[in-house]
Image (cartoon, rainbow, N blue to C red):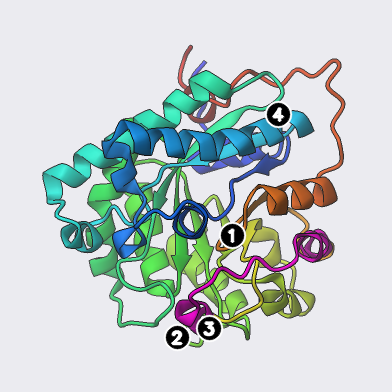
Amino acid sequence: MMSCAPPSARLAARLNDLPFLCDGGLETHLVFHEGIDLPAFASFPLLETAAGRARLERWFARFIRLATERGVGFIVDTVTWRANADWGARLGYDAAALSRINREAVRFARDLVARYATPDAPILVAGIVGPRGDGYRAGRVDVDEAQAYHAPQISTLASAGVDLVCAMTLSTVEEAIGIVRAAAAVDVPSAISFTVETDARLADGTPLPDAIRWTDAATGSSAAYYMINCAHPSHFAPALTSGDDGWRARIRGVRANASTKSHAELDESETLDEGDPSDLAERTRALRAHLPRLSIIGGCCGTGERHIRAICEGVFAPAPLAGRTTPRTASRATLHGDPT
């Protein structure tokens, strides 16, 4: 039977079923551990070759296997963080080429679902959207312009079959509002992941609580949930201990950096600071005391399998496998109420 609930509500209901794991810092792994040149820090060109696709599959497979071991779900990201007009143009991709590569990224992710999903580790596909500019520097952003700019990529990802679109490393409220509105226009659930500086503020100085409140106020709270990524827990944990609970309840996910360094310090570093996986796991576990709906865990810059394993073991208690009734995959049909 066709569900009458809006897409974001159906996604939220699905996320209530069990925790979901994400991968670590793909781009930093490729650059520092595999020696891969990533112009503009873009990983989507790897989809153009068999060798590149094999690298990507090896990366995601290790985290999917970890989710399977723990009996939790997994969210596989499309490698499209840089696959928008301005960044694509720097890499020689025009509008037609970007549409093609975004669709190919979704096909690749769906192939992973078909290959690796199990009854105890359902997989969602998140269509990843990145900032138009540098996510670590504040810039002037107009809401309507942001919506128009991101709409083509979001529409392509939605029509290609993602379960949701997730905007990562956003540093302005205006761009977040534009992305949420663009997603709502094509009836696909959206998630917003802000990045913060060491003072728990966005690059333009906006406090994290205000960023979430203002985005919700301007969009009718239509984003499915919020996340924090590309910052160490020590940067934003202090902001979670005061104020009302409403904005904190909107945060479902955290993908932290391994390093305690600031964005500016990381930009200048010629080596990878992988931090302390055990400490990162403990700090992530401690966040649950202030984030009542935290159920999506992964990593960002500098994190790999050992970080995510430590976090997973520290945050997600082992789930009993016997008698589980979780469906094999959390498919788009399940999330959107389509008949099967």
Residue 80, horizontal then vertical, whole percent: 35, 49
Q: What residue type is labelled 1?
A: Met
Q: 165 or 316: nearer the eye?
A: 316
Of pointers 2 and 4, the one earlier in the residue sequence: 4
Q: Which amino acid does label 4 sit on?
A: Thr
Q: What is the spatial separation of the Cα atoms under label 2 and label 4, in whole angstroms?
A: 40 Å
**Whether label 2 touches label 1, CB < 8 Å:** no
> In the rendered image, which residue does mark 2 sit on?
204
Mark closer to the observer (2, 3): 3
Residue 297, horizontal then vertical, whole percent: 67, 51
Q: What is the spatial separation of the Cα atoms under label 3 and label 4, in whole angstroms?
A: 36 Å
Residue 133, horizontal then vertical, whole percent: 31, 71
The magenta stretch spans which residues? 263-288
Query: In the rendering, which numbered label is found on residue 68?
Result: 4
> In the rendered image, which residue does mark 3 sit on?
265
Q: Magenta span: helix, strand or loop, mainly?
A: helix
Of pointers 2 and 1, the one earlier in the residue sequence: 2
Mark closer to the observer (1, 4): 4
